[in-house]
Amino acid sequence: MNVLKFTLSGKTAFFKKPDVNSYFYFTYGHIHKIALLGIFGAIMGYGGYNQQVRNGNAVYPEFYEKLREIKISIVPKEAVNEAYQPAVPRRNDRQKGYFNKKVQIFNNTVGYANADGNLIVKEQWLENPCWDIYLILQGEVEEEIAKRIINSRATYIPYLGKNDHPAKISHAEIVEMELISLDQSFCMDSLYLKDCFKICLEDDDKLFDMDEDIEITFKYEERLPVELEEATNQYITAPFAYTNSKVMFNQSETAKKTIVGCCQGKCLQFY
């Protein structure tokens, strides 16, 4: 099975959480599927939310309607900082699922901002985010997306959540994927739907063995958007996790709808 792989990065990113009723806007900790579909839609030239408003009969934005069935996988990746290279190599070179966040403050002084003519807005930005993105090539649309990304062609400029944050796409290539056996425990290298897997605790007894060279374990969890609700187009979210601990496949209804494969030695969940 062929898969498109590319690196998606930027200096900053802002994936706005909608459930905030104030002038302080928070961001999701990672790019999510809806935002990634938006990037693919920009590359393909599909319409977004503004075009949906003009077409009152549209249930979903065009990019979502055409791309919602594609299967993607997201792998957090530590961005290379050429100005800083550690003298001692890190013991664990896997990105632990967290990117630094910084609050940006804006002053909006246009007359319609508020009664006082000065609106102060705070936004939480991700700093130097970087991911490896995988897309299963299972149809003509996916093949066209791959062709455009490999040849650096896009109808609209892709950005990371907002046009203040241009996206950098690099290292695009086609790789082979093999489905893996889900009858045994393994390490998942991508973000994965938490309901589909459970952490395997079979090696816990080694934590107290001082002779063992134990890798320090970590776990990241967050609810991320996976679908749009039909009536209002609001996000439908699901719990995601990312860890270097081994996991076991969970026989749930959600798990049966996903694909787990191995690309270049990495185990990935596609959803």
Image (cartoon, rainbow, N blue to C red):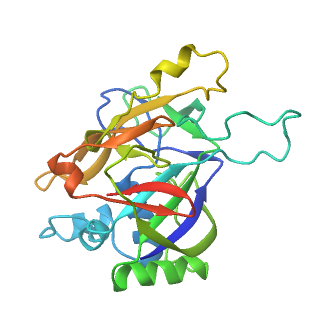
- The quarter of the image holding the N terminus is bottom left
* Rendered location of residue 96, percent (x, y): 56, 35
In the displayed structure image, the side of residue 265 where residue 177 appears, left or right? left
In front here: 155 or 243?
A: 243
Q: Residue at x 33, y 72 (%)?
A: 47
Q: Residue at x 56, y 13 (%)?
A: 208
Residue 57 occupies quadrant: bottom left
In the displayed structure image, the side of residue 222 where residue 106 appears, left or right? right
In the displayed structure image, the side of residue 184 where residue 253 appears, left or right? left
- The quarter of the image holding the C terminus is bottom left
Q: Residue at x 67, y 19 (%)?
A: 211
In front here: 235 or 240?
A: 240
Q: How many marks?
A: 0
168 vs 57: above or below? above
In the displayed structure image, the side of residue 208 where residue 196 appears, left or right? left
Residue 144 occupies quadrant: bottom left
Q: Is residue 121 visible?
A: no
* Rendered location of residue 25, percent (x, y): 42, 32
* Rendered location of residue 134, percent (x, y): 48, 64
Q: Is residue 38 visible?
A: yes
27 vs 171: above or below? above
In front here: 164 or 239?
A: 239
34 vs 89: above or below? below
